[in-house]
Image (tube, rainbow, N blue to C red):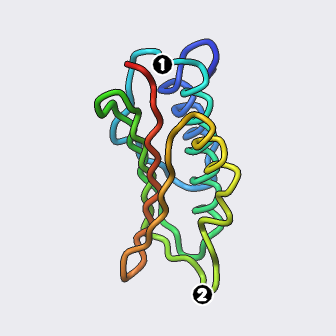
Amino acid sequence: MLADEGLAAGVEALVETSAIPITIADMPEERLPASVEAVGYFLIAEASGLMAALPAVEGATVEAKHEGDRLAIQVTSDAAAQPGQDLETALIDVADRVGALGGRLRVGQAPGGTITIRAEIPCGS
């Protein structure tokens, strides 16, 4: 789906098989470079899988949009990481893939539990 129809279609297919409810808040309909789409999809799949493994998670929200010449992807969830759980380490493969394209990945958790995983990936458009 991803290769044939792009990031939006790939993420829609991912949502259908996800272990947790995922809301798509925003997604570019235009095609992006294949490497950007692949890394974006991998990020969303890994982040939602990680969140599904957290206790008491009710779901996640995914947002992807152009911000200048970058694709900004954000995955948020109401779940809270377990004490001592390092989300950045759990996403090291994602960070490596984002970094290989000249992008950056940030992971944060607000007091009370909201987890935000955000990547900015250069896309040349």
* Residue at image point 53% right, 33% down: 11
The amino acid type of the residue labelled 2 equals Pro
- Left or right side of 1 for 28: left
Residue receiving disc 2: 83
Q: CA distance from mark 2 to mark 1?
A: 38 Å
Q: Nearer the viewer, residue 107 or 25?
A: 107
Element type where label 2 sits in the image:
loop
* Residue at image point 63% right, 38% down: 100
Q: Which quarter of the image is occupied by the N terminus?
A: top right
Considering only order in the chain, which callout, 1 or 2, is on the residue closer to the N terminus? 1
Q: In the rendered view, would you say 83 is above or below 115?
A: below
Q: Which quarter of the image is occupied by the C terminus?
A: top left
Location of residue 113 by image quarter: bottom left
Question: Which mark is drawn over residue 4?
Answer: none
- From the top left corner, tell me how far across and down residue 119 is, in percent: 47, 47
- From the top left corner, tell me how far across and down residue 2 is, in percent: 61, 22
| Residue at the extreme bottom | 83
- Left or right side of 95 for 27: left
Residue receiving disc 1: 32
Q: In the rendered view, would you say 38 is above or below 92?
A: above
* Residue at image point 44% right, 62% down: 77
Q: Nearer the viewer, residue 84 or 12?
A: 84
- Left or right side of 118 for 19: right
Contact, mark 2 vs mark 1 (Cβ under 8 Å)? no
The amino acid type of the residue labelled 1 equals Leu
| Residue at the extreme left | 68
User: Dot 2: within a 10 Å radius of its alpha carbon, few (fewer than 14), some, or many (20 or more) residues?
Assistant: few
User: Dot 1: within a 10 Å radius of its alpha carbon, few (fewer than 14), some, or many (20 or more) residues?
Assistant: some
Q: Nearer the viewer, residue 99 or 74?
A: 99
* Residue at image point 36% right, 82% down: 111
- From the top left corner, tell me how far across and down residue 22 is, in percent: 48, 49
Q: In the rendered view, would you say 75 is above or below 30?
A: below
